[in-house]
Image (spheres, rainbow, N blue to C red):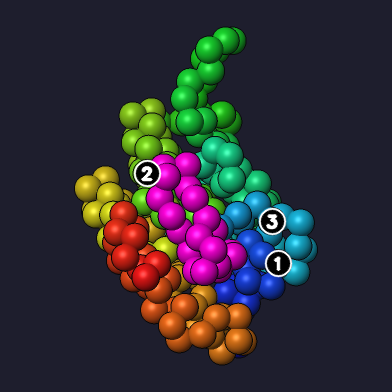
Amino acid sequence: MNTKKEIAEGLLSIGAVFLRPEEPFTWASGIKSPIYTDNRLTLTAPEVRTIIENGLADTIRTYYPDCQVLMGTSTAGIAHAAITGHIMDLPMGYVRGSKKDHGRTNQIEGKLTPGEKVVVIEDLISTAGSACDTVNVLREAGAEVLGIASIFTYGMKKSVLKLAETKVENHSLCDLDELLEVALESGRINETQKAKILKFRDNPSDENWMK
């Protein structure tokens, strides 16, 4: 089994990615969604976690061989950056969503020297907003951001445009297309449900996918 397919099966088996086109979830933005992702659950599933962390390490070695520091997004990327950093014997830190309002008012936690080559670790790329915000904070601090390594991406057009606008590349271990194929093969969804989910992915703000 290839790694992408193996990760897709792992994410589905532990409920880290949950497909429910007949009973949509409601995102914080109010958007109705047939899919819900919580990759924090991978931390409590050692077998899946091991595949993911080794996959992230391999991705960094392949696409970002000059990486010197890993920086996780807050909060879901922090643990994955720490574990992957341990595997690769690299320093890690993380970037807060905003500066602390006390102490040294840090937004970047962990040592970062201007000019260091950094890879951002993210659990999920949906709109790519949080990952790109992290990239911008690191650049403002003088880091050379080589790119992003993430666990899963929906492949939404908005994320593709956001990454291009930020001028940063992302490499995900698994994507929605692969996951839907695995879900279809295993009988978790049918062809009609798959089509609905893809229609949602292509235009999340259009609720016609539910019809």
- Magenta stretch bounds: 17-36
Q: Mark 1 — residue?
A: 14
- Left/right placement of residue 58 relative to residue 113 reads right
The crowd level at tag 3 (other Cα within 10 Å; few <14, some 14-19, many 20+) is: some
Residue 198 appears in which quarter of the rendering? Answer: bottom left
Q: Mark 3 — residue?
A: 41
- Up/down of 126 relative to 29, above or below: below
Q: What element does badge 1 sit on?
A: loop
Mark closer to the chain start, 3 or 2: 3
Instruction: Tell me the kind of residue under disc 2.
Output: Gly
Instruction: Tell me the kind of residue under disc 3.
Output: Leu
Q: How many marks?
A: 3
> Can residue 158 be seen from the camera position used here?
yes
The N terminus lies in which quarter of the figure? bottom right
The C terminus lies in which quarter of the figure? bottom left
Q: In front: mark 1 or mark 2?
A: 1
Q: Mark 2 — residue?
A: 129
